[in-house]
Image: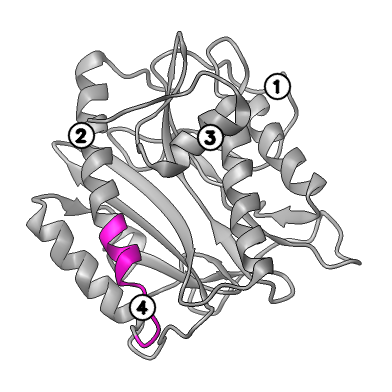
Amino acid sequence: MIPLKTAGEIEILRENAQILNEILAELLRAARPGVSTGDLDRLAERLVREAGVRSAFKGYKGYPATICASVNEEVVHGIPRDDRVLRDGDVLSIDIGIERNGYFADRADTVIVGRPRAEDLELIEVAREALAQGIAAARAGGRLGDISHAIGAYVVRRGYNFAKRFVGHGIGRAMHEDPQVPNYGTPGKGPKLRAGMVLAIEPMVWRAEPDETPEEEERVLADGWTVVTPRGQRAAHVEEMVLITADGPEVLTATATATEVAAKTGNEIRVSLG
């Protein structure tokens, strides 16, 4: 059963999303050459504590850290380490979740450390536009498959591939609620989208090799957590929390990304400012 949020619950989720935005922004600003992902995790732990919230990741199914810090070919769930030192030009994705007042928030973004390469800028642009397409399809009366199809179809058109075993999700009283939100699907299929649903939509993409088939999947390393691309390509992961309303999707994790979504799609997409 997909839970619908009350007005009171939505207000708490908005507040949590804004707290999380501030923490993630500070982490991304700290991501410079010479800084380790272990350093970033310790900073995240301090920022979470100072904000008076709880890490949603640390201890979750045994996960050992406050953030997921995925570098280059790592798609998601990269475990922070002191010996994973960021270098100029690295692509870094940070995924972080918090809990406050019994409700969760979850968000991810990808940046380039130091000087960017053109192909890496395009990688992140494709991921963010795929997210924009998915958010624009998150409309009451539609179907979950509309969101998934919008993401996957765009990614493939751009010559990229996407994570198939790892998906977005509902969020609220639990970090992972129904429904699952895959990065590919069939329009007009799946559960009906209703006002009051809150979804964490999160494309994870990489550039496809010329002979790579759409069926090639990401794989999990021996640590049981770190997910990498099938052929070592660099990956990007972006995630926003989206409330479905009668008037269109509202991005609870209001950021510059959310503003770009509205501009690019031409759709009415509301952003929460807390």
* Upstream in sequence: badge 3 or badge 4: 4
Badge 2: how crowded within 10 Å, few (<14), some, or many (20+)? some
User: What's the distance in space between the residues labelled 1 and 4, CA to CA?
Assistant: 40 Å
* Upstream in sequence: badge 2 or badge 4: 2
Q: What's drawn in magenta, residue-wise?
A: 25-34
Main secondary structure found in the magenta portion: helix
Could you tell me residue 149's position as x and y percent?
71, 33
| Towards the viewer: 95 or 218 | 95
Residue occupied by mark 2:
15
* Upstream in sequence: badge 1 or badge 4: 4
Residue occupied by mark 4:
37
Quadrant assignment, res 16: top left
Q: Quadrant of the C terminus?
A: top left
Residue occupied by mark 1:
189
- Disc 3 + disc 4, Cβ < 8 Å: no
Q: Residue at x 65, y 51 (%)?
A: 126
Which three-letter amino acid code belongs to the residue tagged 4? Thr
* Secondary structure found at label 1: loop
User: What's the distance in space between the residues labelled 3 and 1, CA to CA?
Assistant: 24 Å
Q: Can residue 28 be found in the magenta stretch? A: yes
Mark 2 or 3: the one toward you: 3
* Upstream in sequence: badge 2 or badge 3: 2
Mark 3 or 4: the one toward you: 3
- Disc 2 + disc 1, Cβ < 8 Å: no
Badge 1: how crowded within 10 Å, few (<14), some, or many (20+)? some
Mark 1 or 4: the one toward you: 4
Could you tell me residue 130's position as x and y percent?
63, 42
Which three-letter amino acid code belongs to the residue tagged 3? Val
Q: Residue at x 40, y 84 (%)?
A: 33
Height in image: 241 above or below 11?
below
- Disc 3 + disc 1, Cβ < 8 Å: no
User: What's the distance in space between the residues labelled 3 and 4, CA to CA?
Assistant: 29 Å
